[in-house]
């Protein structure tokens, strides 16, 4: 999972992306984000679900339009927090993500910084490592294929090279390509994608992709402690079977649920992640585990546990993103940032001591 390298590449002009809508051309086989649907895709259930969710989206869009009224900023207050939890319409996501995460402020304080990263001399090793992963990024998305016009592989390359140059301690690590890809799909802009990635990787989820991956390792252990407190039977099963949390949830954390949960559900999670921070990742993970604890507890051994953790990320519960997001704020119960911070401190100390 950890493929990394240094910092820089050949000069690349910034690309302003205009992703064409695929709804009319390939509505039957491609979703609104360009992802091809599987052969066994349940169109009947999808249409039934969307008939209800579209009404929700319409109401949310009207409310958000009234709230913003042409503004280029979003205030952080209880009303906005409530709106974010109920979902941000796609047309407003770039603005809301940028302003609530602090990415817009960083962009404005550093005019021309992204372009300077692209124009700098880059490390050929970083370029080679990133290029190796470009064709592996969303092969099921028509916008990331070389035949696409525009091909988002170029934008993806620019964002990843710029970030690798910006954060030399990280460079590039597998998993970052999927995060950058989602940001490009939504923002349709390289510079915005870069600053949103900086918000996620440098501030919201620090030390996830550094060589030691201490933040990632600690947060997986934090989840284990939260499961011990909130779903003790599952925690006991993991203990009895000697299953490390990294075996079953590492991809949840590394990819922030990309390719784990449905696209629309992931985007709703990210709405809250950019506004409320990293505890949202724990809320989602706890909800998946708590809601499916009966399924998990039927497992008899390590392979069975791993299979059940994959199974609980599929199905109607996750497809209905609006209902699912309501559940993540109900099912796990209270979860304060102070609790998460204390657990992180103890887990980091334990991991550091074990590895020293």
Image: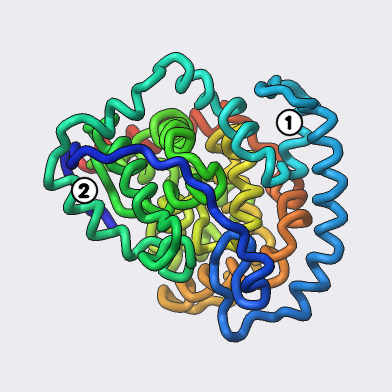
Q: Is residue 352 left or right of residue 128?
A: right
Task: Give residue 132's position: percent from left, percent from top.
Answer: 23, 60
Task: Give residue 193's position: percent from left, percent from top.
Answer: 46, 39
Q: Is residue 277 left or right of residue 291?
A: left
**Classed neighbour count for the residue bearing mark 2: other residues with Cα under 10 Å, few (<14), some (14–19), many (≥20):** some
Q: Looking at the image, which is closer to me, 150 or 275?
A: 150
> From the viewer's perspective, is residue 347 above or below residue 149?
above
Q: Residue at x 33, y 29 (%)?
A: 115
CA–CA distance between discs 2 and 1? 36 Å
> From the viewer's perspective, is residue 1 above or below residue 202?
below
Q: Residue at x 67, y 63 (%)?
A: 318
Q: Secondary structure at mark 2?
A: loop
Q: Is residue 248 left or right of residue 7?
A: right
- Quadrant occupied by the C terminus: top left
Task: Give residue 133's position: percent from left, percent from top.
Answer: 28, 59
Tell me whether the residue at label 2 lies in contact with that at label 1, contact meaning CB atoms closer than 8 angstroms: no
Q: Secondary structure at mark 1?
A: helix
Mark 1, residue position: 81
> From the viewer's perspective, is residue 277 above or below residue 221?
above
Mark 2, residue position: 4
Of labels 2 and 1, earlier in sequence is: 2
Residue sticking out furthest to the front? 149
Is residue 104 visible in the rendered structure shown here?
Answer: yes
């Amino acid at each position: 999972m950890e493929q990394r390298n240094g910092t820089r590449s050949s000069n690349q002009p910034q690309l302003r992306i205009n992703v064409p809508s695929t709804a009319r051309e390939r509505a039957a086989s491609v979703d609104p984000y360009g992802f091809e649907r599987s052969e066994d895709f349940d169109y009947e259930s999808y249409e039934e679900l969307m008939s209800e969710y579209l009404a929700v989206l319409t109401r949310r869009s009207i409310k958000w339009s009234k709230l913003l009224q042409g503004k280029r900023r979003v205030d952080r207050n209880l009303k906005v927090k409530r709106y974010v939890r109920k979902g941000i319409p796609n047309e407003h996501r770039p603005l809301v993500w940028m302003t609530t995460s602090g990415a817009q402020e960083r962009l404005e304080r550093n005019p021309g910084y992204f372009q300077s990263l692209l124009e700098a001399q880059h490390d050929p090793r970083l370029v080679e490592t990133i290029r190796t992963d470009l064709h592996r990024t969303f092969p099921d998305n028509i916008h990331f294929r070389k035949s696409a016009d525009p091909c988002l592989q170029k934008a993806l390359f620019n964002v990843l090279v710029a970030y690798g140059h910006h954060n030399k301690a990280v460079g590039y690590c597998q998993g970052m390509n999927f995060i950058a890809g989602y940001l490009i799909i939504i923002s349709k802009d390289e510079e915005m994608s870069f600053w949103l990635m900086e918000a996620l990787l440098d501030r919201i989820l620090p030390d996830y992709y550094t060589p030691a991956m201490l933040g990632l390792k600690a947060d997986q252990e934090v989840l284990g402690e939260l499961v011990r407190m909130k779903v003790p039977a599952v925690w006991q099963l993991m203990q009895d079977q000697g299953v490390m949390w990294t075996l079953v949830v590492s991809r949840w954390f590394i990819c922030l649920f990309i390719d784990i949960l449905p696209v629309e559900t992931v985007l709703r999670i990210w709405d809250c992640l950019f506004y409320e921070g990293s505890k949202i990742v724990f809320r989602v993970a706890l909800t998946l585990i708590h809601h499916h604890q009966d399924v998990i507890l039927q497992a008899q051994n390590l392979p069975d546990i791993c299979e059940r953790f994959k199974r609980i990320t599929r199905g109607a519960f996750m497809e209905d993103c609006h209902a699912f997001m309501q559940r993540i704020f109900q099912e796990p119960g209270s979860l304060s940032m102070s609790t998460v911070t204390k657990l992180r401190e103890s887990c980091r100390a334990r991991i550091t001591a074990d590895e020293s």
